[in-house]
Image (tube, rainbow, N blue to C red):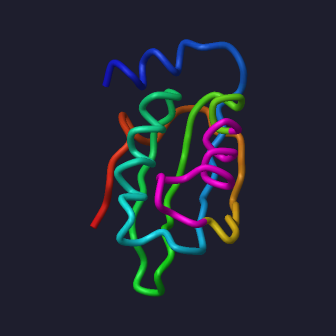
Amino acid sequence: RLLARGLAGMAGPLKSVDYEVFGRVQGVCFRMYTEGEAKKIGVVGWVKNTSKGTVTGQVQGPEEKVNSMKSWLSKVGSPSSRIDKTDFSNEKTISKLEYSNFSIRY
């Protein structure tokens, strides 16, 4: 709850974006690293594996932090992952965060 309160008090618009990461992203600790990176950057949302071998989720936070997370999801990932492509969708400005932290969903 403190994280969300801290983020809400920051200057600049809040953004929300959905993502799906394609490549070798399951069985390589991708979700765990995504959660860690999100907490380090200071964004909220979630991540989960899909039945088709991709990883999907949502990121919310100040625009510049969401952009940092988008870059990480497109280019970095977990150490043994291979990102072929990342699709971003439903990008929009939001008035308040819908999540209080970043979590792994199952």
Q: Which residues are magenta?
A: 67-82
* Total numbered badges shown on the rendered structure: 0
Residue at image x 51%, y 63%?
A: 81
Residue at image x 66%, y 47%?
A: 70
> Horizontal and vertical percent for residue 14?
64, 31
Q: Nearer the viewer, residue 27 or 14?
A: 27
Image-based side of 106 in relation to 101, left or right:
left
Image-based side of 69 in relation to 106, left or right:
right
**Residue 78 sits inside the magenta stretch:** yes
Corner quadrant of residue 2: top left
Residue at image x 31%, y 60%?
A: 105
Q: Nearer the viewer, residue 52 or 92?
A: 52
Question: Quick one: which residue is furthest to the left in this view?
Answer: 106
Q: Nearer the viewer, residue 41 or 10?
A: 41
Residue at image x 71%, y 47%?
A: 92
- From the image, which quarter does the N terminus lie in? top left
Image-based side of 69 in relation to 58, left or right:
right
**Residue 71 sits inside the magenta stretch:** yes
> Relative to residue 93, is residue 104 depicted above or below?
below
- From the image, which quarter does the C terminus lie in? bottom left
> Horizontal and vertical percent for residue 3?
39, 22
> Relative to residue 42, is residue 105 depicted above or below?
below
